[in-house]
Amino acid sequence: MAIPLIRNTNLARIEFAELHNAPWAAANTQIGLTATECTALATKTTAARNAYEAQQALKNQLKAATVDADEKVRILARATSDALKRVRAKAGEVGGNSVYVLAEIPPPATPSPVGPPGTPYELKVGLNPDGTIKLSWKCANPAGAHGTIYTVGRRTPASGPFTQVGGSGTRSFVDATLPAGAPSVTYQIQAVRSTLSGLAAQFTVNFGVSGGEAVATVVQGGAPKLAA
C-alpha cells in the first residue's frame, strides 16, 4: 500500500506547504506552475499557519480555564456542604421545619421503619470430610436491614421440640454436633434482627449412600435436592 504523500492532519498539510513553497517558486516553469500560483500558495500557507497558531493558543487558554473553573467549583462545593451542615445543625437546635423553610431546602425525610427479616429458603447441604455438615441458604431481607443474624435449631426425631445448636451472622452454618448415624435431621432456621424476627423455615435432611459415597437429600417444599 502506498504511503500518503501528506499526512491527514492540519499541521502536516501546513508543514508540507512551508517546505515546498520556496523550491516550487524557484523552479515553477520547470514543474508546471506559474509565478502567480506560487505566490498565491505562499499567501495561503501563511494564512493557514497564523490560523493554526491562533487555534492552538485558544486551546491552551481553554485548558487553563477548565482547570481553573474545576478548582473553583470544588471549593464552592466544599463551602456549600459546610453551609448545609450548619443549617441542619441549627434546624436540630430549633426543632421543626422553620429553619429549612427559611433556607429554602427540603427537610430530611422521616425514615420508614425497616420491616422484619425475611424467611430462609433454598437450603443447601455439604458433607465435610471431618463429619461436620455445612448448611447454606438464601434469605431476602428488606432494604436497609443491618445486623441480621440467623439462629439454627435442630431435631433428630421426626417430631418434637427443636434444640438450639448455634447462630450465624452470615447465610451459612457448620453443624459439628450432629449425632453420628442419624438417618435424618430437621433444621429450623430463623432470621433475627434486634427485636424483630422473620418467619422460621424448616428443612428435612435425609442421609444415605449413593454410588459408594455419603449423600444428603434436602426436602424443602418441592423435589428433593441431592448434595454430595
Image (tube, helix red, strand yellow):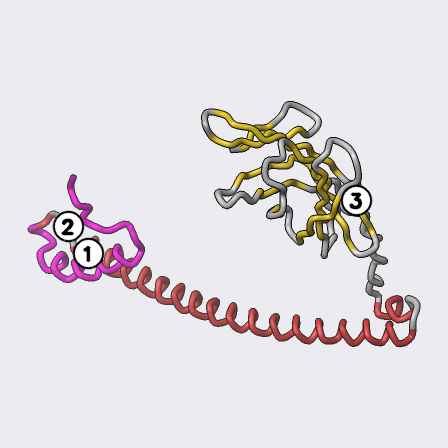
Q: Do the residues labelled 1 and 3 touch (CB within 8 Å)?
A: no
Amino acid marked by disc 1: Cys
Describe the element under mark 3 as helix, strand or loop.
loop
Residue assigned mark 3: 198
The disc placed on residue 33 is 2
Percent coordinates x, y for residue 80 in the rendering: 71, 72
Is 97 inside the magenta-drawn segment? no
Q: Vertical placement of 64 versus 178: above or below? A: below
The disc placed on residue 38 is 1
Q: Do the residues labelled 1 and 2 touch (CB within 8 Å)?
A: yes
Magenta-highlighted residues? 1-30
Percent coordinates x, y for residue 167 in the rendering: 69, 51
Residue 163 seen in the figure: yes
Is 18 inside the magenta-drawn segment? yes
Residue drawn at (16%, 56%), measured in percent from left and top? 35
Amino acid marked by disc 3: Gly
Residue 172 seen in the figure: no
Q: Between 180 and 15, which is closer to the camera in this rendering?
A: 180
Quick check: 205 left or right of 200? left
Quarter holding residue 10: bottom left
Quick check: 117 left or right of 17? right
Sequence-wise, the earlier of marks 1 and 3 is: 1
Q: Between 1 and 105, which is closer to the camera in this rendering?
A: 105
